[in-house]
Image (cartoon, rainbow, N blue to C red):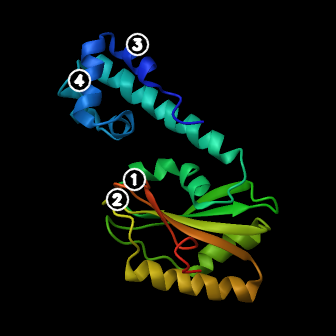
Amino acid sequence: MGKLFTARAFIGVIGKDSVADALIRHFGSLKALSRASFKELRQFLPRRKAEAIMAALAISNVAETEHALSAPLSSAEAIYRANLDMKKFHQEVLRVVLLDCKHHCMTKIDTFKGTVNECLAHPREIFRAAVIHSAFAFVLVHNHPSGATSPSETDLQLTKRIVAGARILQINFLDHVIVGQATADGRGYFSFQEAGLL
């Protein structure tokens, strides 16, 4: 389904085609514009219009996330789309996404919050969530506030420990996805499963 907030709707909120064109040109794309801060928008717009755009983009992200959650989370791309809200966090957050036997989301639990570049998570809390909710499977998702998607050594070590624990507990650990900002290839995430690290 893509962004509900289309370029045409954006122009309607702004009120003038020339301003809309200038904003999209300045930020490079509607996707890049959606990551703009209020302060950045205020450089071009009066307060009310900047607030209206921020609200419309926030609603669009919620709608896109809800749409993504209605489908099975059977790929890294689907997991990423269902957790787009993590791109806005200013500190690292580790989220456990619990799935039923058809890989539909049962619930999402933010288990750890860290600093701007590190989140020291403990496997016990991750598995506790999966056991309490009788999840068939789970995925881990965490963000990198810097926007980089490459895993750190800490990320690699945590993932290895979770793989080992999941085998012992016989819970399906499907993927660990790092949410960052889109790179030149258009991907804003890193998947341990796709990289062959699970």
| Residue placed under numbered mark 4 in the picture | 22
Q: Residues within 10 Å of mark 2 (few under 14, many from 20)?
A: many
| Residue placed under numbered mark 3 in the picture | 12
SS under mark 2: loop
What residue type is disc 1 on?
Phe
SS under mark 4: helix
Where residue 52 sits, quadrant-wise, is top left
What residue type is disc 3 on?
Gly
Q: Residues within 10 Å of mark 4 (few under 14, many from 20)?
A: few
SS under mark 1: loop
Question: Of marks 3 and 2, which one's residue comes earlier in the chain?
Answer: 3
Q: Quadrant of the C terminus?
A: bottom right
**In the displayed structure, does residue 144 sit left or right of residue 61?**
left
Towards the viewer: 71 or 136: 71
Residue at 61 percent of width and 53 percent of height:
78
Query: Label 3 to label 1, Cα distance in Å?
Result: 29 Å
Question: Of marks 3 and 1, which one's residue comes earlier in the chain?
Answer: 3
Q: How many marks?
A: 4
Tell me if label 3 and label 2 are in contact, CB under 8 Å. no
| Residue placed under numbered mark 2 in the picture | 145
Q: Residues within 10 Å of mark 1 (few under 14, many from 20)?
A: few
Residue at 75 percent of width and 84 percent of height:
169
| Residue placed under numbered mark 1 in the picture | 89
Question: Of marks 1 and 2, which one's residue comes earlier in the chain?
Answer: 1
**In the displayed structure, does residue 74 sit left or right of residue 8?**
right
